[in-house]
Image (cartoon, helix red, strand yellow):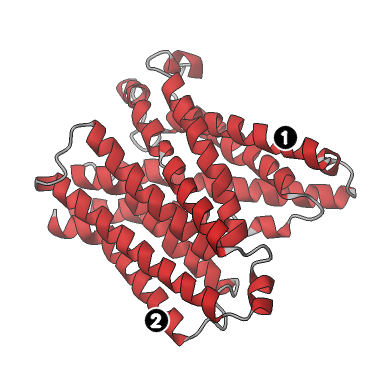
Amino acid sequence: MSAAASILLGLFIIAIGSFGQSSSYVPINKVKQWSWESFWLVQGIFAWLVFPFIGALIGRPQGVALNQLYAQGDVWMPVLYGALWGIGGLTFGLSMRYLGVALGQSIALGTCSAFGTLIPALVKGTDLFHGQGLVLLLGVCITIAGIAVIGYAGALRSRNMPDEERKKAIKDFALTKGLLVALFAGVMSACFSLGLDAGAPIKQAALNAGVSPLFAGLPVILLVTLGGFVTNACYCIEQNIIHKSGREYFHVPVNVFFNNLLFCALAGVLWYSQFFGLEMGKSFLASSSVLIAFSWSILMSLNVVFSNVWGIILKEWKDSGRKTAVWLLIGLAILIFSIFFPSIVG
């Protein structure tokens, strides 16, 4: 396979995972008679424990237990970064609540893209003003520009939509509060990328033991999501106690319980697919070090693109005006260009 074909395949695999993540909030709309903290905790069990654990088993060397593999590196830093990312993931969910799928993911993922791409590069000593470092910096700037344009489109939508329609599309819509939450979520969510970097020795140990590059990074993902689960679980259980909503888990009809369990599991596997796809896709980008470094930003850009597609499907942009639609399309076009930018100039 040629280098160009390999890169395209890698980008396609990342796109599949991104589409899964961007779709993960749709099944949650099917959850009934559970408060936000209840369904967030249950979907988190699937997204951050069950499916990452299955992935880690796939990515461990044959005949080697996970604890033996983890002994080959520092497990605490990935878990710590995961706990910090968990704070971002928690507020990320709140950004969806206040801004909707399209705008909430756009702002949070744009911030996450910048910090999650540039901070690991700086830690490695990359010169961001020359050579491939400059390409990386310009790519991130293009991504942020696309996010900013979509954010502007979101502001236009908020201004143009009648209050009744806005509340119908997004029940708890609150622009100022939502923007602050989304920005904070993006900064903290970037810790996931730092956690993956911190677990690089474990991934290398898996590679040295003969694990395919497609799956060698999956055990590290479990460490990061484990830290994130602890953070989110503590908050959700606290909210269950405060709101006395803990009884909701089992005090619903049996058919509603299994309905909720099913859609939380679906949301969990769709969410996890983004990182499963990222690790698989990166293995096909090995011929380009700048694309490897930019892969986090690529994933975030694709998440924004697909989340806005869902926003259109869910009628979050309905009746927002032609000008808003034009700016939305311009923003999406910039993001799509940002995905291919490193390959064009690299």
Q: Nearer the viewer, residue 121 or 207?
A: 121
Q: Nearer the viewer, residue 70 or 175?
A: 175
Q: The residue tagged with tag 1: helix, strand or loop?
A: helix
Mark 2: few/some/many CA within 10 Å (<14, 14-19, 20+): few
Identify the residue at image location x=40%, y=58%: 302
Instruction: Answer yes or no: is residue 11 visible.
Output: yes
Indicate the position of residue 234 as horizontal and vertical percent values.
66, 31
Residue 238, numbered circle: 1
Indicate the position of residue 102 as horizontal and vertical percent values.
51, 65
Q: Is residue 84 left or right of residue 37?
A: left
User: Which residue sits furthest bottom?
Assistant: 322
Residue type marked 2: Val
Residue type marked 1: Glu
Indicate the position of residue 8 as horizontal and vertical percent values.
28, 56
Identify the residue at image location x=37%, y=62%: 147
Q: The residue tagged with tag 2: helix, strand or loop?
A: helix
Q: Is residue 298 left or right of residue 51?
A: left
Taking 174 as reference, is 199 above or below it?
above
- Determine which residue is flagged by label 2: 326
Q: Is residue 229 left or right of residue 73?
A: right
Identify the residue at image location x=55%, y=58%: 178
Indicate the position of residue 157 as horizontal and vertical percent values.
51, 76
